[in-house]
Image (cartoon, rainbow, N blue to C red):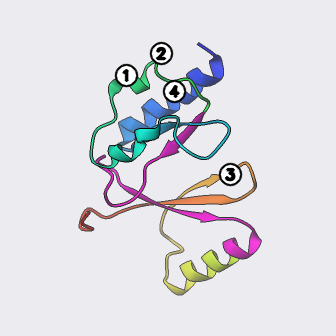
Amino acid sequence: MNPDYERALKCAQGYRRLGLVPLPSRMDEKRPTFLEYAKYRTETVPEAVYTTEGWQTTNIQLLTGACVPGPLRVLAVDLDGDEARDIFRQMCKSHDLRSRKFWIVSSPSGGRHIYFAIPKAVEQ
């Protein structure tokens, strides 16, 4: 197996252990490698996807939103550019969210993706 694919697969397996729903993502456009990914908002992703034979990409996408079937549901905010980051900081300050923990990921284009856990009380 390609070492880069293997690293991505190990990350995807780790995300699953956390309760997230990772999907293999195409390397040429922003979408999962399989077309029927929308059904995994209500169905479990087959284990075969998370094997060395089934995982053939270096990219990972996470299903997000209240309807995701995994035990850890997340909301993602995409902040592209300084203005978006400044507005987000102001919103956090005005709502006293400064002390909360976010999962922050830098995108290749220089943006930021901010992930929040969705409380269990929020229904699908």
* Label ID, residue 107: 3
Q: Is residue 80 left or right of residue 92?
A: right
Q: Is residue 27 left or right of residue 121?
A: right
Q: Is mark 3 on a helix, strand or loop?
A: loop
Which residue corresponds to the image point at 52% horizontal and 35% vertical from the top-left?
33
Residue under numbered circle 1: 48
Q: Which one is closest to the eye, mark 3 or mark 1?
A: 1
Q: In this view, does 96 lie to the left or right of 19?
A: right
Q: Earlier in the sequence, mark 4 or mark 1?
A: 4
Residue under numbered circle 4: 9
Mark 4 and mark 1: Cα distance apart in space: 12 Å
Front residue (pair 99, 47): 47
Q: Do the residues labelled 3 and 1 touch (CB within 8 Å)?
A: no
Extent of the magenta region: 59-85
Mark 3 and mark 1: Cα distance apart in space: 28 Å
Q: Which one is closest to the eye, mark 4 or mark 1?
A: 1
- 76 in the magenta segment: yes
Q: Which one is closest to the eye, mark 2 or mark 3?
A: 2
Percent x, y of residue 52: 48, 16
Q: Do the residues labelled 3 and 4 touch (CB within 8 Å)?
A: no
Q: What amino acid type should be assigned to the residue bearing mark 3?
A: Ser
Which residue corresponds to the image point at 51% horizontal and 32% vertical from the top-left?
11
Which residue corresponds to the image point at 43% horizontal and 49% vertical from the top-left?
63
How packed mark 3 is, by other alpha carbons closer than 10 Å (few <14, some 14-19, many 20 or more), is few
